[in-house]
């Protein structure tokens, strides 16, 4: 987990899941900007991952002071049904803010051939087509 002032980047969704058990609600309410990655999800991964992802999204509901929430979905192959599975808990959640959603396939972030690596959608390079996304200036 990366941290700057009240801005957090959570690359392991389990961290978001465990925050409420280690911090009082008064501190959780101080989180202003959070980016969180979903667990990798695809055909060969057990359905329990979706249940755990729902628990992570439920934990994000406790961050009631959020001004910006960025969720990076990690469907293994990028197929529509796996994105829908990851989005279902997000769509049903009572989050403090409407999240920015982006997605990238796991295999594009860590391919066998490193020269084919694509940048993270949250931190695209200047030549990446998504580099002009709008986010609060204070967000990272």
Image: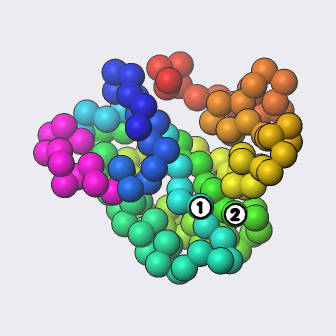
Circle 2 residue: 76
Residue 18 is one of the magenta-drawn residues: yes
Q: Identify the residue at horizontal 28%, vertical 54% (top origin).
A: 18
Whether label 2 touches label 1, CB < 8 Å: yes
Q: Position of residue 116 (x, y in %)?
A: 86, 42
Helix, strand or loop for the magenta stretch, by majority: helix
Magenta highlight on residue 105: no
Residue at image point 13% right, 45% down: 24
In the rendered image, the vertical position of residue 3 relative to residue 102, given as above or below:
above
In the picture shown, does residue 131 fall above or below 100? above
Q: Position of residue 59 (x, y in %)?
A: 32, 57
Above or below, 132 relative to 26: above
Residue at x-position 63% and y-position 36%: 122
Of residues 4 and 26, the one nearer the viewer is 4
Q: Is residue 26 in view?
A: yes
Image: magenta residue range: 17-28
| 28 displayed left or right of 104 | left
Colour mapping: rainbow
The quadrant of the rendering that contains the N terminus is top left
Q: CA distance from mark 2 to mark 1?
A: 6 Å
Would residue 1 appear left or right of 126 to someone viewing this image?
A: left
- Residue at point 18%, 48% (across, down): 22
Marker disc for residue 40: 1
Residue furthest toward the bottom? 47
Tell me where residue 76 appears, x and y as whole percent: 69, 63
Q: Earlier in the sequence, mark 2 or mark 1?
A: 1
Quadrant housing residue 85: bottom right
Q: Residues within 10 Å of mark 1 (few under 14, many from 20)?
A: some
Secondary structure under the numbered disc 2 in the rendered image: loop
- 10 Å crowding of disc 2: few (<14), some (14-19), many (20+): many
Callout count = 2
């Amino acid at each position: 987990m990366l941290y700057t002032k009240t801005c957090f980047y959570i690359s392991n969704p389990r961290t978001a899941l465990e925050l409420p058990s280690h911090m009082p609600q008064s501190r959780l309410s101080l989180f202003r900007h959070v980016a969180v990655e979903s667990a990798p999800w695809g055909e060969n991964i057990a359905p329990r991952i979706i249940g755990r992802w729902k628990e992570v999204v439920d934990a994000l509901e406790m961050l009631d002071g959020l001004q910006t929430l960025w969720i990076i979905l990690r469907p293994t192959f990028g197929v529509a049904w796996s994105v829908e599975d990851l989005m279902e808990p997000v769509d049903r959640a009572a989050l403090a803010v409407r999240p920015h959603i982006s997605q990238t396939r796991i295999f594009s972030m860590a391919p066998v051939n490193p020269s084919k690596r694509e940048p993270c959608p949250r931190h695209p390079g200047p030549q990446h087509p998504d580099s002009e996304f709008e986010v609060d200036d204070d967000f990272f």
